[in-house]
Image (cartoon, rainbow, N blue to C red):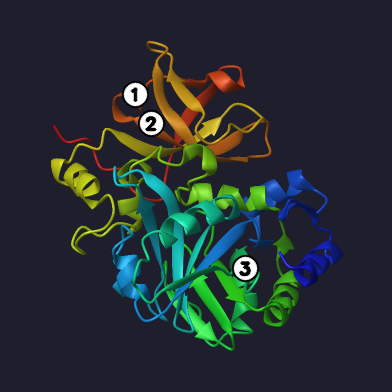
Amino acid sequence: MNDQWRRILEDAGAVIVDGQVIHYGSPLRETKVVISGSVMADLSHYGLIAVRGKDAQTFLQGQLTNDITLVNDDHSQISGYCSPKGRLLAIFHIFLRNDTYYLQLPASLLESVMQRLRKYVLMSQVTLENASDALVRIVCSGPDSETALTTILDTLPANANETRQQDGLTVVRLPENDIAPRYIIHGDGPSMEKVWTVLDARAAPVGARAWERLDIRSGIPEVYPTTVEEFIPQTVNLELLSGVSFTKGCYTGQEIVTRLQHRGKTKRRMFRVSIASESLPQPGAAVHSQQDNTTAGAIVRAAPAGDSSCEALAVIMMEHRDDALFLPSLGDAAVALEPLPYDIPPLEA
């Protein structure tokens, strides 16, 4: 987060810790309003890796789970980055802007992931750099924020992952949930200051944790330092979010990912859950089954719900999905499955 953008956020009342907006003075209200109203949030706690050069597309095609050739000025994508064993090192939200691919991921992973990617550049004409301060990122949700965007854009992207480029802004429609349409806007500081002002007239600013509740409602997984190499793409439903291509050809970890898909036996799947605790579980925290007190899964990400509970995404073994579940790390807090905006396929025999 550059100093100028930090000042703008602080003038709006933001409490910022380690580059992340915690809240704007009322975390409980913010947690609740994301479900019932129009909101906007700063996304500086996510970083951007800029990938450019003559061989950028070919290089990324050999590294990522999705078909990078489908990314253009009008279409973004979610994609996984795997180890040779097919386990996720990161999940990227990728968009193209001015002939540069931008890979968005948690800032806490950026340096380690970028260093790993650079090992595979070899003789390719590709450069990778930390572009986190080059572009500001604002997300918004709700009908009033959507109306506000129409005052500065000729047309809005109509479907998930569609992109619009206008006047130095890159606008992506995010995957759906049961609440309201959501968008992320990227641009330079001066342009985004204007966007913030327009949105601020119609939407309430909220902190990072409050916004994360909407990502959870959308069933969007994330990888953090504590869960690197913990999950295979299908176990976090990445292919259900159009984040995996099974026709693009080889990439790192492809053999494992494809084999699992063709067997049709994804024995673990990610579910949205509610947890009877005000405390948030850490990513990777074990979920247990009361049936035999064995580990039934692990937390992917979590956010407060504002009613003495929290919401999370958790990978659960399919054989335990109907069990009574609990979190030992939170005093045996009860865990209950909740609906997702997409269907989980059954475990084939």
Q: Secondary structure at mark 3?
A: strand
Give the percent coordinates (x, y) of residue 20: 70, 53
Which is nearer the eye, 89 or 269?
89
Mark 3 vs mark 1, CA separation in Å: 39 Å
Is 36 drawn above or below residue 224 in the view shown? below
Q: Secondary structure at mark 2?
A: strand
- Earlier along the polypeptide chain: callout 2 or callout 3? 3
Q: Are marks 1 and 2 in contact (CB under 8 Å)?
A: yes
Is 113 drawn above or below residue 190 in the view shown? above
Q: Quadrant of residue 150?
A: bottom right
Of badges 3 and 1, nearer the viewer stands 3
Per the rendering, the mark at residue 320 is 1
The residue identified by callout 3 is 137
Give the percent coordinates (x, y) of residue 320: 34, 23
Residue type, mark 2 in image: Ile
Per the rendering, the mark at residue 316 is 2
Q: What crowding class fits label 3: few (fewer than 14 Cα within 10 Å), some (14-19), or many (20 or more)?
A: many
Q: Quadrant of residue 305?
A: top right
